[in-house]
Image: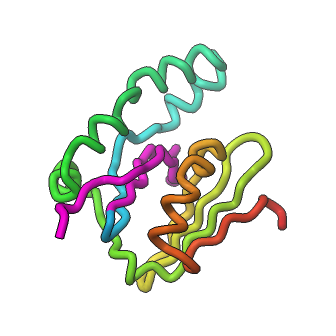
């Protein structure tokens, strides 16, 4: 059997009580992994409101390359990289719904046997992983337009 490796992934955002958190949603042959990248607090949100695109581009520049850096690690190294990183075996996934928005952020709903997680991501990034995710999760994954 071949060694488990990261096959693909995308940057996602999870809402927190005070701000949000950037994560990477990664897919391997056996499981999906949620890896922490950065917390974005109220100060960042206020700065982004004040400076608009300038603040957003600076913020994104700091995390540029995170997907590439993390994806070069083995799945076990990714899980050890941050104590809050975790994996879900595909057998524990009840459903994964990708709600694609025509503009703005799309939503991802991950339901497992013991949790439900709502994430936001770029619709372009989600579309880029459609075939991979379908091949790994089959009937457990649903792609739909937001509002349908």
Give left or right: position of 129 versus 7.
Answer: right
Picture residue at 20% right of the left edge, 45% below the top: 73
Q: Which residues are magenta?
A: 1-28
- The picture places residue 76, in percent across and down from the top left corner, at 17, 58
Q: Is 23 covered by the magenta stretch?
A: yes
The count of marks equals 0
- The picture places residue 64, in percent across and down from the top left corner, at 40, 27
Q: Is 22 covered by the magenta stretch?
A: yes
Looking at the image, is 39 positioned above or below residue 90? above
- The picture places residue 63, in percent across and down from the top left corner, at 39, 29
Give left or right: position of 123 versus 88.
Answer: right
Looking at the image, is 10 positioned above or below residue 66? below
Q: Nearer the viewer, residue 58 or 25?
A: 25
Picture residue at 47% right of the left edge, 46% below the top: 10
Q: Quadrant of the N terminus?
A: bottom left
Q: Nearer the viewer, residue 14 or 104?
A: 104
């Amino acid at each position: 059997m071949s060694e488990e490796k990261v096959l693909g992934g995308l940057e996602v955002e999870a809402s927190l009580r005070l701000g949000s958190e950037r994560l990477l949603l990664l897919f391997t042959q056996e499981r999906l992994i949620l890896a922490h990248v950065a917390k974005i607090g109220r100060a960042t949100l206020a700065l982004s409101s004040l400076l608009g695109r300038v603040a957003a581009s600076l913020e994104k520049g700091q995390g540029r390359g995170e997907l590439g850096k993390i994806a070069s690690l083995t799945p076990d190294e990714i899980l050890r990289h941050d104590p809050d990183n975790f994996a879900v075996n595909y057998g524990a996934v009840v459903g994964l719904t990708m709600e694609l928005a025509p503009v703005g952020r799309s939503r991802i709903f991950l339901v497992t046997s013991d949790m439900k997680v709502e994430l936001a991501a770029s619709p372009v990034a989600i579309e880029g992983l459609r075939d991979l995710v379908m091949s790994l999760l089959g009937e457990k994954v649903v792609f739909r337009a937001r509002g349908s």
